Each structure stands twice: as C-alpha cells, then as structure tokens.
Amino acid sequence: MSVWKTLVKYGMDKEESLEIMTEHALDGLLGPRESENLEPNTSIAIVAQRLLLEFKPDITAARTMEEELVASHMRVVYSVPQHGEYMYTGSPTEPILSNAAAILMNRRKTTGDGPFDALEILSKLFNRGMTLQGDRNELIGRLLDILAIDNAIKNSRTSFSSPKTLFHSSPVRVVDYLKHFVSQRFLQQVLCSTPMNTGKIDPTLVGVTLEEMFKDCWVHTSHYVKADDDDVLQVRNIWAYWIRGCAVQLKRGGRSNRMIPIHWTFFPETLDLSMKAWSQAEAGSPGDTQSSG
C-alpha cells in the first residue's frame, strides 16, 4: 500500500501506477524462477490466491510447501502455535495480487504446451492428501465460479468500465456469468425461469424471466475470502466485497456456504446478495424460481 500511495502522491498517471503495481504483484507470485514454465509451487500459489486454498498442517509435505509459499510466493503467516511445529497461513485478500493471479491463470502454461490447468493442480493436491478433507467439494465449487467468470470476461461483448490493467478482474453481467456456469442442457430453463413467490413481489414483476430481471446486474469476483460467521452478510459490508472483487466462503454447517455480491445498476447505490445453497440446503429444494417454459 505504501508503494501505491507513493506512486500516486508524486503525480504518476493512475494507469501507469496500476501497471507498476501489477508487475510487482506478478513478480511476487512468480518468485525466483529460471524459466518461463511455472514451477509446481508457483502454480499452487496462483490457485491459492484465488480459491482460498488451505492445507493440512499434520502433513509434512504440506508444511514444507507452505513454508516455500510464504518465503517466495506472497503467502502470509497468520499465527504459529506455541509448539512451533507448523504455521497457520493464507493468501492475502488483496485485489492487485488476485488480479495478478488471474492474469497468470489466463495467459500462462503449467507444463508443456497446454493452458493453465487449475483442476489438475487441485487433483494432485487431493491425491496427496494435502488439503483439508471437508474442503474438496467447496474448492471445486469455487473453481467453477472463478472459471465461469474468467470465461465470461474473455467472451462477453459488453464490459464494465475497467482500467486495461484490470481486464482479468473486470465485472461481468450476471447473465453472462450464468451462461458459462450452467450446463448448456439446462441454461435456457434457468434463464427463462420466473418467480414462484408471486404474492410477495411487485405485481409488475410477475412473469419477468431471470434473464430479463438480471440483464443489467453485475458480479465482480476475482477471488474468494473466508468468513467464520454470518456477520459479513450485513448490508453495510456487501459493497466492500463487490468493490474488492471478493466472493465469500461461509463456515460450513449453515444453509448456504458461498456468497457472490451482485450490483443492481437500476437501484443506485445498492448491492444485493447472490446466495448459493449446496450440500447444506434442504435436499430436493426447488428454490425460489420456476421454469416459464
């Protein structure tokens, strides 16, 4: 932050300042390197920055890797137990760092000639037992969200006004996000769905499809952050998450475990929530929408 303030204070153009800060963030995530190919720990650092990756402290290989990520790839230490046998670490929720990770995920190769494969990286960590067991489904869900948003950014014809340097962290329309998140088999059913709770909404909205209702609504998600309670869902907090490009992983055990803020442009100065109910939701619950077709 002090570097950013210095650049702005002494009159450097904001776009140029962003470019310099982004280069610093890219160098920090990449760490020491001898070739253009990404080292395994570098790839893990990139994924961890966006997906809220946590490791099992009782696995020696995981502890060794965390030490490397802290030493060379911008991961931070939260605390060290009194016995000193391991650390509690995490990736900082910094928009510039998360934007740098998004740039690397979308332009770099892990090994060989293929694109960056976050799923393969997670699969290897799962097979080695290095991630917390209960987090696997949540991790895959977060990955699907991030990949859908990345693809929406790259393929959408309309984009939110964002500096060129922050292209990979641009807001996208909710509908464009859904087009890359939902299977093509069910996409039209989702987009054409209408409210079921017709007695509780404005009569003029009865019969309005999801696609029409959300056509001018935007999501802004470059990375996930963790919350241990529902206090983060207070309206006073939601705008900050949207501006910083954060989606929230809620503590397990509640009805919903992920939250993505939505900006409703036709309600000035207002942000709403998108709650995604998964394994904690009632089995077979149809939600609050129904198909119009």
Image (tube, rainbow, N blue to C red):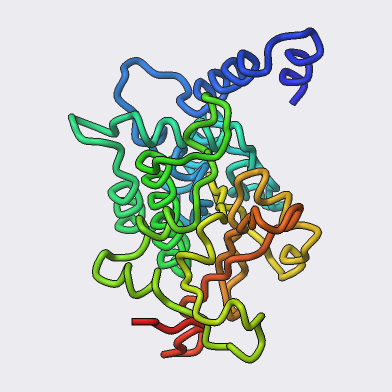
Visible in this render: residue 81?
Answer: yes
* 260 and 65: which is toward the camera: 260
Please state if 107 lies on the left or on the right of 247 as rendered.
left
Q: Position of residue 16 (x, y in %)?
A: 61, 13
Q: Is residue 48 above or below residue 181?
A: above
* 255 and 238: which is toward the camera: 238
Q: Position of residue 187 (x, y in %)?
A: 32, 67
Task: Please tell me which residue is depicted at 41% across the width and 31% down the height of the picture.
Answer: 104
Residue reaching furthest to the left: 113
Q: Quadrant of the N terminus?
A: top right
Q: Quadrant of the C terminus?
A: bottom left
Q: Position of residue 77 (x, y in %)?
A: 65, 41
Visible in this render: residue 280?
Answer: no
Q: Is residue 194 above or below residue 215?
A: below
* 60 and 106: which is toward the camera: 106
Q: Position of residue 272 (x, y in %)?
A: 67, 63
Please state if 141 lies on the left or on the right of 163 as rendered.
left
Q: Quadrant of residue 231?
A: bottom right
Q: Quadrant of residue 261?
A: bottom right
Please state if 269 lies on the left or on the right of 136 as rendered.
right
Please state if 148 lies on the left or on the right of 226 as rendered.
left
